């Protein structure tokens, strides 16, 4: 042992007292992300945040500090308020950013869920304006796409419109039968109303909570005259303990549903929709939100939260919301085939926006795959403009019949010209051509065909090819970072307003992190 070289170590004195406390400023690298967050949030006008504080009572933590902490936390994939509060006690970057303030998780959660929900869009677009002033974006080109994020809701807490409608109809049928039973045993009622039903729930009447309550009151009046009547007592008990509460529940469900087909009992603003990640599994529906996001140079310059699963009907609302804050529409919009509807093409044309927007069969057309794989699609029926008729692959004529008005979910009105084959019954390929037991029909939107031609010309132009190739590296790259790199696949908060806050914080964190990287 004696011939071994003497080991040399650096001094290690963990409990040595320091003459002066450590300076956090010297411990933060000059170009660290936390400094960029600090600088950019300092450049924001936080008057909207200050307006959320009423004043009086105990002094509150400064909203600018709390905003900095939340934005930095989201950039570090720290979304839990408890973990953020822990970092403020242990992490020098959080300590420096907060000026050694240590708000607890309740304070952080209240700021995020209550204070921020009224002004998150105003704050977000304040960051967008900073990016514009710094020269990172021009607010002219806009790449838009949608993604679905799971809500903080139990996946088995669903309420469906069809089920609610069916259960309510069954309940009302039970009520009618019960009252018919009472009428048969009530001579007084027969004398007064003859063979009619109770006036509150007669044939063709809408049965609601108020009508059921009136029926229960009428039965109560009868029971005062005949307190031992078992059928009346059972009817009253069924109404008050079963039928009325159920009717009240179904009416509340219908109010929550609005125009939707489903909602979650855990988060009533969330709609059940199919998540892209689940397509490779069993395709299970989950409660979630449809997020519409627009980017430029991979900076998020607009976002909106929707309850509708489809992207098509969200575009107009999304762009109008962006316009309210930036006071202008983008000059150029690039989107995938999920947005290529007649309504959207007409809207973009009306707003003078150059639209590089695909439609559902654009790629099939370019690869000549429609005729080969699906020969009986409408697009493969040649049209004769002189005779105003189409011909199917079996050379049968489909002639014009009438014009039909069509209204979209958003209230957009359009027309479809209906063409019908004279006789499909003996056609050997009828089952391949149509599932209908009648003749094959074509629903032709003349305006839509013209809009698709305009879109096709734009998409195939040199600029269109450039825009299409740029789209996957724009908004899809942003979603890749937020969902996969940062792991944000499920909201922590519940309700539309709070979900909007979370996505706003996340996109602000993304924008500022990108500035730091550049």
Image (cartoon, rainbow, N blue to C red):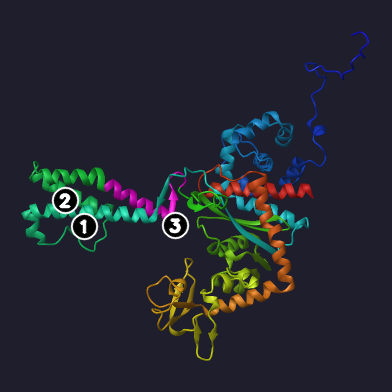
Looking at the image, do the residues carrying marks 2 and 1 touch, with CB atoms under 8 Å apart? yes
Q: Nearer the viewer, mark 1 or mark 3?
A: 3
- Residue stretch in magenta: 244-267
Q: Is residue 237 above or below residue 189?
A: above
Question: Which residue lies under the disc numbered 2?
Answer: 218
Label 2 secondary element: helix
Residues 311 and 382: in front is 382
Dot 2 alpha-carbon crowd within 10 angstroms: few under 14, some 14 to 19, many 20 or more: few
- The secondary element bearing badge 3 is classed as loop
- Figure quadrant of residue 319: bottom right
Q: Position of residue 316 (x, y in %)?
A: 56, 65
Q: Are marks 3 and 2 in contact (CB under 8 Å)?
A: no
The answer to which of marks 2 and 1 sits earlier in the sequence is 1
Instruction: Of the two numbered discs 1 and 3 on the same chain, state the one appearing first in sequence.
Output: 1
Which residue is denoted by mark 1 in the rendering? 200
Task: Point out residue 314 in the picture as x, y percentages from the top left corner.
Answer: 55, 62
Q: Is 157 or 316 nearer to us in this picture?
A: 157
State the image coordinates of residue 258 (x, y, percent, origin top left).
42, 57
Residue 237 lies, in percent from the top left, at 20, 43
The residue that label 3 is drawn on is 260
Quick one: SS at disc 1?
Answer: helix
The N terminus: image quadrant: top right
């Amino acid at each position: 042992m004696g011939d071994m070289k003497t080991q040399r170590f650096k001094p290690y004195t963990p409990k040595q007292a320091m003459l002066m406390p450590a300076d956090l400023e010297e411990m933060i690298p000059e170009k660290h992300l936390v400094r960029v967050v600090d600088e950019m949030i300092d450049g924001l006008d936080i008057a909207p945040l200050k307006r959320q504080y009423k004043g009086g009572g105990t002094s509150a933590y400064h909203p600018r500090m709390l905003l900095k902490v939340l934005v930095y936390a989201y950039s570090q994939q720290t979304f839990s308020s408890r973990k953020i509060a822990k970092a403020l006690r242990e992490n020098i970057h959080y300590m420096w950013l907060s000026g050694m303030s240590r708000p607890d998780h309740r304070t952080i959660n209240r700021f995020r869920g209550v204070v921020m929900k009224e002004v998150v869009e105003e704050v977000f677009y304040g960051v967008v304006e900073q990016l514009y002033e710094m020269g990172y974006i021009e607010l002219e080109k806009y790449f838009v796409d949608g993604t679905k994020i799971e809500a903080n809701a139990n996946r088995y807490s669903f309420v469906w419109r069809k089920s609610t409608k069916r259960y309510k109809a069954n309940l009302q049928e039970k009520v009618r039968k019960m009252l018919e039973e009472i009428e048969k045993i009530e001579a007084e009622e027969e004398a007064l109303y003859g063979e009619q039903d109770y006036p509150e729930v007669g044939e063709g009447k809408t049965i609601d909570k108020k009508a059921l309550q009136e029926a229960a009151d009428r039965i109560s009046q009868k029971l005062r005259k005949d307190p031992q009547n078992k059928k009346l007592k059972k009817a009253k008990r069924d109404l008050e303990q079963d039928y009325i509460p159920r009717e009240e529940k179904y009416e509340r469900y219908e109010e929550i549903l609005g125009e939707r087909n489903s909602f979650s009992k855990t988060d009533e603003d969330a709609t059940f929709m199919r998540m892209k990640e689940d397509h490779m599994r069993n395709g299970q529906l989950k409660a979630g939100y449809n997020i519409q996001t627009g980017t430029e140079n991979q900076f998020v310059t607009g976002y909106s939260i929707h309850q509708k699963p489809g992207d098509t009907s969200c575009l107009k609302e999304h762009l109008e919301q962006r316009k309210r804050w930036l006071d202008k529409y983008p000059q150029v919009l690039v989107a995938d085939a999920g947005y290529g509807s007649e309504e959207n093409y007409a809207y973009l044309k009306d707003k003078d926006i150059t639209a590089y927007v695909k439609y559902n069969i654009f790629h099939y057309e370019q690869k000549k795959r429609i005729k080969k794989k699906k020969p009986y699609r409408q697009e493969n029926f040649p049209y004769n403009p002189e005779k105003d008729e189409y011909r199917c692959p079996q050379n049968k004529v489909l002639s014009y019949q009438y014009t039909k008005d069509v209204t979209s979910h958003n209230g957009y009105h359009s027309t479809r010209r209906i063409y019908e084959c004279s006789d499909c019954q003996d056609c050997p390929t009828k089952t391949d051509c149509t599932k209908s037991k009648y003749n094959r029909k074509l629903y032709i939107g003349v305006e839509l065909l013209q809009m698709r031609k305009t879109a096709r010309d734009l998409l195939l132009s040199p600029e269109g090819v450039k825009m299409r190739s740029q789209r996957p590296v724009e908004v899809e790259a942003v979603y890749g970072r937020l969902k996969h790199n940062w792991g944000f696949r499920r909201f922590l908060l519940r309700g539309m307003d709070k979900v909007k806050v979370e996505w706003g914080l996340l996109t602000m964190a993304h924008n500022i992190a990108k500035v730091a990287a550049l």
